[in-house]
Image (cartoon, rainbow, N blue to C red):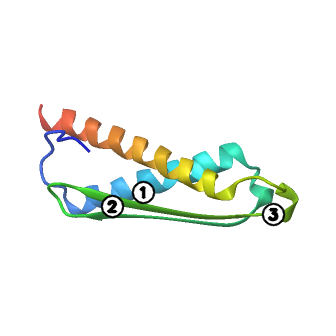
């Protein structure tokens, strides 16, 4: 991720970044698959470092057998991409506020 001109992240900001990333992944999954068809959904996000910030997101989804040939791995990969988009947006907004 490019340099956004952020100050070092406080622990509360790192926690919020993780929450934003996790929520985005969950929202994405639930926008594509009905909740009743999800047997397992584990989402975790971890921030390492403060400068540069390193974000790791892991999505593990298990779908009901009634979903047939639905590609759960592709769904998980796309959810990770969405979580990074949301995390970047959060960081950009933070950078704008810190420059004021």
Q: Residue 19, image x and y in percent?
A: 42, 57
Q: Which residue is mark 3?
A: 64
Earlier-in-chain disc, 1 versus 3: 1
- Marks 2/3: CA distance? 31 Å
Q: Is residue 82 above or below residue 23?
A: above
Residue at 35% x, 55% y is 16
- Choose between 58 and 17: the one closer to the eye: 58
| Dot 1 alpha-carbon crowd within 10 angstroms: few under 14, some 14 to 19, many 20 or more | some
- Choose between 27 and 80: the one closer to the eye: 80
Q: Quadrant of residue 8?
A: bottom left
Please identify the quadrant where the C terminus is shown.
Answer: top left
Residue at 84% x, 56% y is 68
Q: Quadrant of residue 60?
A: bottom right
Furthest residue toward right: 66
| Dot 2 alpha-carbon crowd within 10 angstroms: few under 14, some 14 to 19, many 20 or more | some
Residue at 59% x, 46% y is 28
- Is 39 on the left or on the right of 42, as rendered? right
Q: Are marks 1 and 3 in contact (CB under 8 Å)?
A: no
| Dot 3 alpha-carbon crowd within 10 angstroms: few under 14, some 14 to 19, many 20 or more | few
The label nearer to you, 1 versus 3, is: 3
Q: Residue 41, image x and y in percent?
A: 63, 65
Mark 2 element type: helix
Please identify the quadrant where the N terminus is shown.
Answer: top left
Determine which of the numbered discs, if any, sits on residue 15 in the image.
Answer: 2
Q: Which residue is mark 1?
A: 19
Q: Are marks 1 and 2 in contact (CB under 8 Å)?
A: yes
- Marks 1/3: CA distance? 26 Å
- Is 53 on the left or on the right of 72, as rendered? left
Q: Residue 54, image x and y in percent?
A: 27, 58
Earlier-in-chain disc, 2 versus 3: 2
């Amino acid at each position: 991720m490019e340099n956004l001109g952020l100050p070092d992240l406080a622990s509360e900001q790192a926690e919020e970044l993780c929450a934003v990333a996790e929520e985005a992944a969950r929202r994405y999954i639930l926008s594509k698959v009905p909740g009743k068809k999800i047997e397992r959904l584990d989402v975790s996000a971890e921030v390492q470092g403060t400068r540069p910030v390193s974000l790791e997101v892991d999505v593990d989804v298990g779908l009901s057998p009634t979903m047939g040939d639905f590609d759960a791995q592709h769904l998980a990969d796309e959810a990770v991409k969405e979580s990074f988009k949301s995390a970047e947006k959060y960081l950009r907004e933070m950078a704008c506020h810190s420059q004021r």
